[in-house]
Image (cartoon, rainbow, N blue to C red):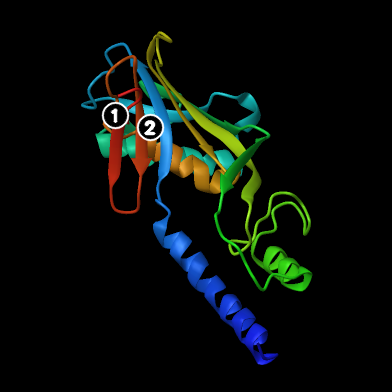
C-alpha cells in the first residue's frame, strides 16, 4: 500500500461526514410531541363571552416574557370565537402558567457494528471534537461511526409544561383545567411554549378526563390517545 492510499482513504471518510450528518437529519422524524390532559365542566360557547388572560403565578404578572406567551393564548381564544376584554370586564378569566425543570441525564447504548481500518488518535480527536461535543473532547458520550464497538451517548432531557385554567369571573367557578407537557433535549422556552400552547388548543376543549399525545409538524397536526 502506498503512502497516498491511507491519505486518500482518510480524505474520503472526511468527505463522507457531511453526507452522513445530512442523512441522519433527513431520517429524523421532525415534530413536537406533547401529552395534553384536559378537564371541563361545561365550558360556555363563545357567543357573548369575553375573556382575559392573567398570570396564574403572580411572579410572572407584568413580565414581557409572560405577555409574549399570553398573546399566543389570546389568539387561540379569539380563533375559537371568544372576545378579548380587560380583566375587570371579562366574563372569563384564563389563568395561564408555564415552566421547565432543570433537566436530567439519560444514557443510551447501541452497537454501531462499524470498524475503521484507518482510525488513529488524530482523526478521533478531529471527528469527535468537530461534530459530537456535548460533554467535552474525551467524554464518554462520543463515538466514531467508522470505529467498532458500542455507542454510548449521554444527553440531558428537560420536561416543560403549561397550565391553563378558565374560571367564571363573577363567581370564581372553575370551568376548565388543562395541562400540556413535553420532554425534549431543548430548554428554550421561546421554542417550547408556543408549541405547547398550540397542542393545548388542538380540538379544544376536548373530552373531559382524556389525555392525548399530540404531534405538531410544520404542515400537519397528529393526535393520538395515550395508551392506544
Q: Which residue is rendered at x = 49% and y = 72% of the image?
A: 19
Q: Nearer the viewer, residue 175 or 109?
A: 109
Residue at mark 1 = 204
Q: Quadrant of residue 117?
A: bottom right
Image quarter of the N terminus:
bottom right
Give the vertical position of 57 relative to 2 (above or below): above
Q: Secondary structure at mark 1?
A: loop
Answer whether residue 186 is visible to the viewer in this image.
no
Q: Which residue is rendered at x = 48% and y = 38% of the image?
A: 70
Answer whether residue 223 is visible to the viewer in this image.
yes
C-alpha gap between disc 2 and disc 1: 7 Å
Q: Which mark is residue 200?
A: 2
Q: Which residue is rendered at x = 56% and y = 71% of the image?
A: 17
Q: Nearer the viewer, residue 143 or 177?
A: 143
Q: Nearer the viewer, residue 14 or 105?
A: 14
Query: Does 46 sit left or right of 33 as displayed?
Result: left
Residue 26, image x, y percentages: 41, 61
Give the vertical position of 208 relative to 8 (above or below): above
Amino acid at each position: 500500500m502506498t503512502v497516498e492510499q491511507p491519505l486518500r482513504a482518510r480524505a474520503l471518510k472526511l468527505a463522507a461526514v457531511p453526507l452522513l450528518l445530512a442523512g441522519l437529519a433527513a431520517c429524523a422524524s421532525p415534530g413536537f410531541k406533547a401529552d395534553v390532559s384536559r378537564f371541563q365542566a361545561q365550558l360556555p360557547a363563545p357567543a357573548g363571552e369575553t375573556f382575559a388572560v392573567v398570570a396564574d403565578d403572580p411572579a410572572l404578572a407584568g413580565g414581557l416574557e409572560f405577555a409574549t406567551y399570553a398573546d399566543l393564548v389570546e389568539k387561540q381564544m379569539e380563533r375559537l370565537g371568544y372576545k378579548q376584554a380587560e380583566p375587570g370586564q371579562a366574563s372569563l378569566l384564563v389563568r395561564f402558567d408555564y415552566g421547565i425543570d432543570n433537566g436530567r441525564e439519560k444514557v443510551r447504548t447501541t452497537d454501531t457494528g462499524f470498524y475503521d481500518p484507518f482510525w488513529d488518535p488524530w482523526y478521533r480527536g478531529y471527528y469527535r471534537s468537530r461534530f459530537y461535543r456535548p460533554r467535552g473532547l474525551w467524554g464518554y458520550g462520543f463515538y466514531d461511526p467508522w470505529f467498532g464497538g458500542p455507542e454510548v451517548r449521554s444527553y440531558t432531557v428537560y420536561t416543560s409544561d403549561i397550565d391553563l385554567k378558565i374560571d367564571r369571573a363573577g363567581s370564581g367557578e372553575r370551568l376548565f383545567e388543562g395541562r400540556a407537557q413535553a420532554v425534549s433535549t431543548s430548554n428554550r422556552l421561546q421554542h417550547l411554549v408556543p408549541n405547547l400552547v398550540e397542542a393545548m388548543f388542538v380540538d379544544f376543549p376536548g373530552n373531559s378526563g382524556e389525555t392525548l399525545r399530540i404531534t405538531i409538524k410544520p404542515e400537519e397536526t397528529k393526535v393520538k390517545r395515550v395508551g392506544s
